[in-house]
Image (cartoon, rainbow, N blue to C red):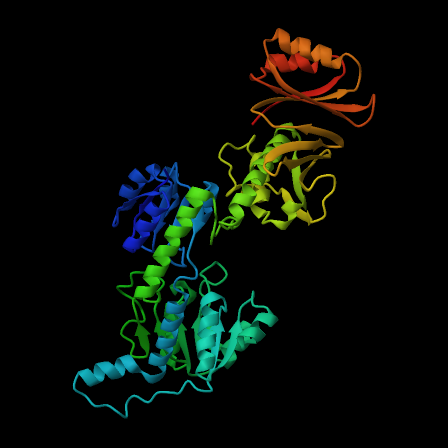
């Protein structure tokens, strides 16, 4: 039974979901890093929010860990490259708190426009400073949305309902999508120059860190107001303070800060700045939603192999998982076969899908081909880190699909490109679930993969089978199956032999010296 650790506070319903799905679960919150490191090796899954830091050091001790699930959208507290290199799937729940975070951004915009926090404090202090708090309307103002994805698009929709004019900067926003949303797509500099309000809804990456700094703030129209409910590192806080003091920026409403928990900050104490303690997802509905979603996603992955909202591997829906399962075995076998017979420098891999399999989600299958291919060189490779390892080694990866079927209703062909040549392996499913090799390079052959196999390339001449059988028999090796294929009589031939025992190096050397044998290779699966 898979075992999951919940190390941050989640809804009790999450625990129930894990157990209902057949997953054992422990709840241990408030663990110090050393305490987490000491026990993490006993778990298949780790469910977190923002408090737990899943560092490279923690992952090094997580010898059995298969998945980290973040209840929420931000994964700044997870070392994703380290997780990927160790083959750990990292999931988040990008939709569970979208509405809540968007609503908080709108609330902050209202509070900023009408100076509500300062007015509240003044009034409760017994003052009646009606003329002091002169706000601005939102109607007809230009809202600049930086990052028009999940949350940003909801903010844009709400702003349009307030009769604001919305412009958006997002490199991944298509013109068609912008039209559907009712926003105007612009470049960042134009957004800065035109917007009365700017709201940030982009992830924190190397490209977005310090997005609003002294230079970009200087490009803004005088009196702009800024809202950030995304990530604190998007704004250089000292530069924002200087811009507020100069009057370039009229005010800011911030839910996130460069360093959290923010006990001290350059912006604290400024009357023009509204601050909340990272409350974007802090509603009863959102906390419940993300907890339930992360439990469902992690349980599905650990029990059925379904992958949803993963950040470092292709998604596999619960519906697709059973359809892909027999193909996953075939893909791994083809990759492993290719990896074991490839001895020169690997330059590229092309995976071709034909027939029924071409209609499926094939990205996980390609990852498994790469895993099998690289495993003879790297014991730690798996379907999560295989694509990354391949790219690090400058191995070009290509994938093609043809929905038409050839001699078989479904087919996977793996073409390996090396420094010296290209070679292909082709496989199919018999009866929709039994993997079979049906082609090795130009030679047609039908063979079932077994634990121990002998691959021989030979000249098609009389006596070869007899010599091989005698040699194996003398060594006490029992033959389970024997498959032969050739391009034409007397030309290139291939023998693929399943045996019950491991072939030793000494025996392999003898087989390689038999008449007509061009090459012999022992395979294990």
Image location of residue 161, percent across then percent down: 45, 81
Residue 188 at x, y = what percent? 53, 72
The quadrant of the rendering that contains the N terminus is top left
User: Residue 151: where, in percent of width, then height?
Assistant: 44, 68
- Judged left or right of residue 70, residue 130 is left
Image position of 302 with respect to 108: above or below: above
From the viewer's perspective, tell me whether residue 461 is left or right of residue 321.
right
Q: Residue 238: in sight, yes or no?
A: yes
Q: Residue furthest top?
A: 474
Q: Residue furthest left?
A: 126
- Comparing 283 with 311, the one in front is 283
Observer-nearest of 200 and 489: 489
Foreground residue, 450 or 216?
A: 450
Q: Residue furthest bottom?
A: 131
> Percent position (x, y) of residue 46?
36, 46
- Residue 88 in view (yes/no): no
The C terminus appears in which quarter of the rendering?
Answer: top right
- Residue 280 lies, with reference to residue 315, above or below; the image says below
Q: Quadrant of residue 137?
A: bottom left
Question: Can you name the residue that lies furthest to the front here?
Answer: 431
Residue appearing at x 29%, y 82% in the figure: 116
């Amino acid at each position: 039974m898979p075992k999951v650790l919940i190390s941050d506070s989640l809804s009790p319903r999450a625990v129930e979901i894990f157990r209902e799905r057949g997953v054992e679960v422990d709840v241990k919150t408030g663990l110090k890093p050393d305490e987490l490191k000491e026990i993490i090796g006993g778990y298949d899954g780790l469910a977190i929010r923002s408090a737990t830091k899943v560092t490279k050091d923690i992952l090094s001790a997580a010898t059995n860990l298969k998945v980290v699930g973040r209840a929420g959208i931000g994964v700044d507290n997870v070392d994703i490259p380290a997780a990927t290199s160790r083959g750990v799937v990292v999931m988040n729940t990008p939709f569970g708190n979208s509405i809540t975070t968007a609503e908080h951004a709108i609330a902050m915009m209202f509070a900023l426009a009408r100076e509500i926090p300062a007015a509240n404090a003044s009034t409760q202090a017994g003052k009646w400073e009606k003329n002091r708090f002169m706000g601005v309307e939102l109607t007809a103002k230009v809202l600049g949305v930086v990052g028009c994805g999940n949350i940003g698009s909801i903010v844009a929709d709400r702003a349009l309902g307030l009769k604001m004019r919305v412009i958006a900067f997002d490199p991944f926003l298509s013109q068609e999508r912008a039209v559907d949303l009712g926003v105007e797509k612009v470049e960042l500099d134009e957004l800065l120059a035109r917007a009365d309000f700017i709201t940030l809804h982009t992830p924190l990456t190397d490209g977005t860190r310090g997005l609003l700094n002294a230079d970009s703030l200087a490009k803004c129209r005088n009196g702009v107001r800024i809202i950030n409910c995304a990530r604190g590192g998007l704004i250089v806080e000292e530069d924002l303070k200087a811009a507020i003091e100069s009057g370039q920026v009229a005010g800011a409403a911030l839910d996130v800060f460069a360093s959290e928990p923010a006990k001290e900050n350059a912006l604290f104490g400024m009357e023009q700045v509204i601050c909340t303690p990272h409350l974007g997802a802090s509603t009863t509905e959102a906390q419940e939603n993300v907890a339930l979603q992360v439990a469902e996603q992690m349980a599905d992955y650990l029990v059925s192999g379904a992958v949803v909202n993963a950040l470092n591997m292709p998604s596999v829906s619960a519906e697709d998982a059973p359809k892909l399962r027999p193909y996953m075995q075939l893909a791994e076998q083809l990759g492993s076969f290719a990896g074991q017979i490839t001895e020169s420098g690997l330059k590229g891999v092309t995976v071709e899908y034909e027939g029924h399999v071409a209609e499926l989600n094939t990205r996980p299958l390609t990852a498994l081909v790469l895993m099998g291919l690289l495993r003879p060189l790297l014991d730690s490779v798996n379907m999560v880190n295989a694509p990354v390892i391949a790219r690090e080694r400058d191995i070009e990866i290509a994938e093609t699909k043809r929905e038409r079927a050839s001699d078989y209703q479904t087919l996977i062909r793996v073409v390996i490109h090396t420094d010296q040549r290209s070679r292909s392996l082709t496989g199919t499913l018999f009866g929709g679930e039994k993997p079979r090799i049906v082609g090795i390079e130009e030679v047609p052959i039908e063979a079932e993969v077994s634990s121990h196999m002998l691959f021989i390339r030979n000249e098609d001449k009389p006596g070869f089978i007899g010599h091989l059988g005698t040699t194996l028999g003398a060594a006490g090796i029992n033959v389970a199956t024997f498959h032969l294929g050739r391009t034409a009589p007397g030309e290139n031939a291939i023998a693929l032999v399943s045996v019950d025992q491991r072939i030793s190096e000494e025996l392999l050397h003898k087989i390689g010296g038999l008449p007509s044998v061009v090459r012999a290779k022992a395979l294990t699966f």
